[in-house]
């Protein structure tokens, strides 16, 4: 019943049906890296849990409190890509284009349910361990809307897949999903890089089977990361908080106590890139207490030659865009 707005530039929406944990951030980063060399791309997010209101351009010196953790992460990784935050996307898009009229494509972060904007391309993410087809509406499950909402998607990405996923399992997913003729499915997974220093990115800490890891994070669905770490470290202890939490000094003090309790000469505190931008404000506490916090970089890749297919489908769709 709502009237959706369309724009002269192609708008690509990346979102999900569930409340989080499907990997929107790394997939938007992947899309940004794919498109930036060819066209002028920008990112628009609502800036979840930021402590400001209204439209705002994200700058390199912005804080997570001002713009949200994910938009700030986007900006830090791609300084020359315009990033903005605004709850009302239909109003925020013209504002973004006013600041950056050179922009040719806009990536909408977490906008699958934002029906006020009609995207040119709708990308739906669902995680391998928590597929929307087997989930339920809140509060019984994790879905924001009915499963049938997936019919709006043009591309469906099954995220956080095990790298050993078989062709047979892939076929079962495609059969159970019951896709429409206009839809395509892809299977993605994460590549984790060598951890780097929180305040010294030039320092690295390769994980070995003699490393004891203390994971401190505030993200949704940590199972995939923990599974990765357990295969590459001697032990993994965790201190987890709710997604997007703004850490307090008490949280850092708790982390220090638990980390100090680990009887090991080869131990490390790990966090994620999304948590990193929320930990920056605690520079004094972290440095004064000599907490060895390192950040685990993450990249998206695809199974079954899906990377080439996904990239080709994105590029071909944008080439075919007509006002």
Image (cartoon, rainbow, N blue to C red):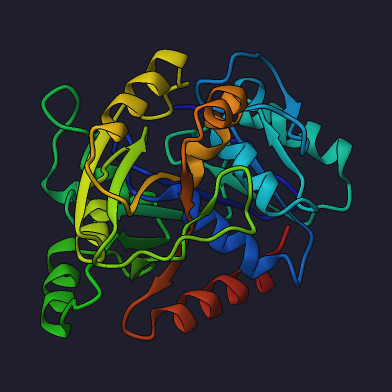
Q: Is residue 57 left or right of residue 154?
A: right
In percent of width and height, residue 164 lies at 19, 78
Does residue 220 sit above or below 244 in this rendering?
below
| Image location of residue 24, percent across then percent down | 44, 48
Residue 145 visible? The answer is no
Task: Return the residue nearer the eye: 99 or 64.
Answer: 64
Image height check: is 149 above or below 233? above
The percent position of residue 6, horizontal first and vertical second, equals: 66, 43
Q: Quadrant of the N terminus?
A: top left
Residue 127 at x, y = what percent? 26, 53
Does residue 32 appear left or right of residue 231 in this picture? right
Does residue 287 appear anywhere in the picture? Answer: yes
Marker count (numbered): 0
Q: Residue at x 50, y 28 (%)?
A: 289
Q: Which residue is at the front of the view, 29 or 257?
A: 257
Residue at position x 40%, y 13% from top? 250
Residue at the spot x=26%, y=42% of the render? 221
Judge from the rendering whether residue 253 lies leftward or rightward of residue 239; answer left or right. right
- Closer-to-camera residue (110/250): 250
| Image quadrant in which the C terminus is located | bottom right
Q: Residue at x 58, y 44 (%)?
A: 108
């Amino acid at each position: 019943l709502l009237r959706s707005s369309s724009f002269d530039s192609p708008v690509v929406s990346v979102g999900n049906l569930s409340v989080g944990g499907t990997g929107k951030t790394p997939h938007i980063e992947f899309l940004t890296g794919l498109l930036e060399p060819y066209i002028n791309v920008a990112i628009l997010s609502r800036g979840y849990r930021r402590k400001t209101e209204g439209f705002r351009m994200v700058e390199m010196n912005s804080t997570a409190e001002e713009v949200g953790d994910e938009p700030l992460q986007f900006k830090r990784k791609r300084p020359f890509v315009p990033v903005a935050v605004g709850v009302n996307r239909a109003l925020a898009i013209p504002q973004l284009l006013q600041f950056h009229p050179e922009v040719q494509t806009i990536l909408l972060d977490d906008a699958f349910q934002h029906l006020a904007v009609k995207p040119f391309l709708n990308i739906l993410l669902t995680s391998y361990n928590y597929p929307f087809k087997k989930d339920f509406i809140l509060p019984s499950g994790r879905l924001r809307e009915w499963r049938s909402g997936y019919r709006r998607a043009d591309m469906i990405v099954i995220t956080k897949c095990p790298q050993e996923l078989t062709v047979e399992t892939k076929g079962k997913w495609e059969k159970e999903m019951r896709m429409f003729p206009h839809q395509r499915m892809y299977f993605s997974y994460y590549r984790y890089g060598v951890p780097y220093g929180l305040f010294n990115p030039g320092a690295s800490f390769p994980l070995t089977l003699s490393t004891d890891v203390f994971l401190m994070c505030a993200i949704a669905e940590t199972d995939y990361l923990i599974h990765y770490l357990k295969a590459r470290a001697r032990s993994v202890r965790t201190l987890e908080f709710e997604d997007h939490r703004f850490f307090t000094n008490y949280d850092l003090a708790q982390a220090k106590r638990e980390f100090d309790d680990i009887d090991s000469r080869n131990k490390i505190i790990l966090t994620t890139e999304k948590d990193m931008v929320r930990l920056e404000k605690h520079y004094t506490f972290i440095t004064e207490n000599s907490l060895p916090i390192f950040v685990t970089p993450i990249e998206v890749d695809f199974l079954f030659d899906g990377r080439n297919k996904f990239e080709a489908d994105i590029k071909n769709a944008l080439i075919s865009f007509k006002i």
